[in-house]
Amino acid sequence: MTLATNTLTETPTETLATAGVSQGDVSDFFALLKPRVMFLVVFTALVGMVVVHPDVNPVVAFASLLMIAVGAGASGCLNMWWDADIDAIMTRTRGRPIPAGRIAPNEALAFGMTLSVGSVIVLGLVSNVLAASLLAFTIVFYAVIYSMWLKRSTPQNIVIGGAAGALPPIVGQAAVAGYVGWESIILFAIIFIWTPPHFWALALVKSADYARAGIPMMPNVAGPDSTRRQILAYTVVLAPLGLAPVAFGFGGLAYAIIATIGGLGMLALAFQVFRVRKGEAAMRVAQQLFAFSILYLFLLFATLLAEHGLGFFRPVFG
Amino acid sequence: MGLGSSGRFSVDSMNKPLPARRLSPEEQKRRRKRSLALALSLGALVLLFYVVTIAKLGPGVLQRPL
């Protein structure tokens, strides 16, 4: 089946033949929720929750986390609905349910909208209005501001759009504490500054793919050399920022060690990306930075989770 | 299939019911799985609302003025 497009007039005949009969499997609908992104959202939101040691019923915390996960999945679904045309062009995304023809665009839109509205309402009922408003803002920011506007119009797309991916710790803290504190704002800042070097490392490797799809990623607009400089600049900010939880007292000794080693690793790889600019080696170091950046962020948050959730916290000062 | 000669939908053609079509065994299987997933999700949601209600209100949920 060919790509089922968003416009009524261009709907392929084959889709019409099966109109009213969904072709999607349960796994296709689950894939629309971007499970890997959802895991990252749940993970970072959970850390946002535990660092404040909230006096909240675990059932309420679990239900809040579940709704944050559903909200994140819903925004991923709306993103796939909107981006189905460019997903069909890029090798990395052409197997997704909509461009592959397994799910019709309207099904995805209905699915995403239902989950968006439902997750926000239930989060508001389970926790509080602040958390629900922040979740709604996150969904709108990702689906509308990032997907519909920034992604196809500016090379700063993932810089500004990165705010959507950085918000879950703030939503998590608001859900269990009822306020937004310094802890979650620092976690937001870490993810926000981490996003450009992470995605631009991937964009360096997949620049041809992005160019074919017409997405103005930084390597395609400003060139690979400028992108490498910016990756290094963001990483120079990220490495010390990763230690901010220690300075603010909610990152313990283990976190300080992990953040220092991880930050140095990020700096070393970003410098390698900056230095090695030609051939296979350049692609290899960019891939290494991309992979290591995921490990780095995971370790930072996992250490905070272990320190606060499992009682491993040992203060660095005093 | 509801398309006019220009290849576009007309209002009349959109209002006509789609011709019935027998589902293939594979489509029936997928539909069963979707229905089951939907039922399980709704059941989980009911359970979640019940547990959260008890957690938020505690035993007080049963103590209300008549």
Image (cartoon, coloured by chain):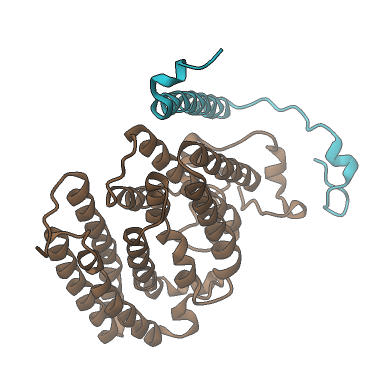
Chain colours: A brown, B cyan
- A317 sits to left or right of A271: left
Q: Of residues A68 and A20, which is closer to you in this image? A: A68
Question: From this viewpoint, which residue is outermost toward the top?
Answer: B66
- Image-quadrant location for residue A240: bottom left
Question: From this viewpoint, which residue is outermost toward the front?
Answer: B65
Q: Position of residue A179 (x, y in %)?
A: 41, 52
Identified at 22% across, 54% down, the residue is A304
Q: Position of residue A292 (x, y in %)?
A: 24, 65
Q: Quadrant of the C terminus of chain B?
A: top right
- B27 sits to left or right of B44: right
A169 over A246 or under it: above or below: above
A302 over A65 or under it: above or below: below
Q: Position of residue B57 (x, y in %)?
A: 43, 26
Q: Of residues A54 and A275, which is closer to you in this image? A: A54
- A15 sits to left or right of A120: right
Identified at 21% across, 68% down, the residue is A247
A277 over A37 or under it: above or below: below
Question: From this viewpoint, which residue is outermost toward the right?
Answer: B12
Q: Quadrant of the N terminus of chain B?
A: top right
Is residue A209 among the parts visible in the rendering?
no
A166 over B29 or under it: above or below: below
Identified at 85% across, 37% down, the residue is B15
Q: Position of residue B64 (x, y in %)?
A: 50, 17
Is residue A72 among the parts visible in the rendering?
yes
- Image-quadrant location for residue A62: top left
Q: Of residues A235 and A93, which is closer to you in this image? A: A235
